[in-house]
Amino acid sequence: MNIPLLQVRNLRVDFGRQAAVRDVSFDLFSAETVALVGESGSGKSTLARAILRLVDSAQGSVEFKGLDLLRSPASVMRAQRRDLQIVFQDPLASLNPRMTVGDAIAEPLKIFEPQLGASECRQRVAAMLERVGLSAGLASRYPHEFSGGQCQRISIARAMVLHPKLLICDEAVSSLDVSIQGQIINLLLDLQRDAGMTLLFISHNLAVVRQLSHRVMVMYLGKLVEIASSDALFAAPVHPYTRALLAAVPQIPPVAAAAPLVEGSLSAGSVAIGCAFRDRCPYALPLCASSDPPLTELDGGRRVACHRSHEVLNPLS
């Protein structure tokens, strides 16, 4: 039996009276890449931080290798962090400007492997810099002396130096040039293949998601509305929101939209009762105003939160 590396169940995060993450449940398995997509403000980054206990959760559980991280003492959670790493969107903001990049990469080693001697620590840092495509001789330089793409490589080196089991990339390539994006993606794929780690990749770039991921989770206003394999989701999206996301991707040459583009913007005003997407959905039913659809499993392991998901074999009308 393939036991999940990470199990998230009924996770909820509240900011005041507003629910940023609502009843989210999913599994991550060893050595797979799962993408999390959705509009800005949909709760993707909050979900990532809740998994790592960087923000407080109102309810739910996050089990990593059978251990509930949300209910573990601080000392136990601290010990788990060597296997749980994150790469943030802005590499310059996540690197200490007063530390050399060598010291930044070495810091996790000093925390989790204090028995290492100074020479061995320098060797590990040098090897990691070389692994991400940078010269070991750059270890004495500071973050401001590097480009954005180089800083992101440094952030990845810092996250990977402990060989984590789970790496979360929170919009890790969105601020980089397209050519640099490709280099970082290839680097992540190489590192994943070599280390056998699990990758949760948060992005709004669907072209990158299609290239990188085994499965895709679609999030809208804090709730997962569709989970499917990458091939299945891009070939035949089911949820109206997923259809709208894919229809909005520019095509060369231009083609007719696969689904009507939704109007409006994210709004939490209608979340309390019913489907949060109903005001933007061209297929909404009266039922959608009174009942929030659960994430229901369809054929092929796909899960969709839509009252009309059973019509997937017949086009929505």
Image (cartoon, grey):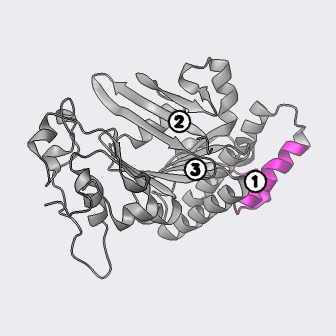
At which x and y percent is residue 220? 30, 44
Q: Quote the CA–CA distance across marks 1 and 3.
A: 18 Å
Of residue 55 and residue 193, the one placed in the foreground of this image is 193
Residue 258 seen in render: yes
Write down the region rendered in magenta.
Answer: 120-141
Q: Secondary structure at mark 1?
A: helix
Q: Is residue 126 magenta?
A: yes
The quarter of the picture where residue 250 lies is bottom left
Q: Nearer the viewer, mark 1 or mark 2?
A: 2
Say which quadrant the N terminus sits in. top right
Q: Quote the CA–CA distance across marks 3 and 2.
A: 14 Å
Residue labelled with disc 1: 128
Q: Is residue 210 above or below residue 50?
A: below
Q: Is residue 248 above or below residue 88?
A: below
Q: Nearer the viewer, mark 3 or mark 2?
A: 2
Of residue 62 and residue 248, the one placed in the foreground of this image is 62
Q: Nearer the viewer, mark 1 or mark 3?
A: 3
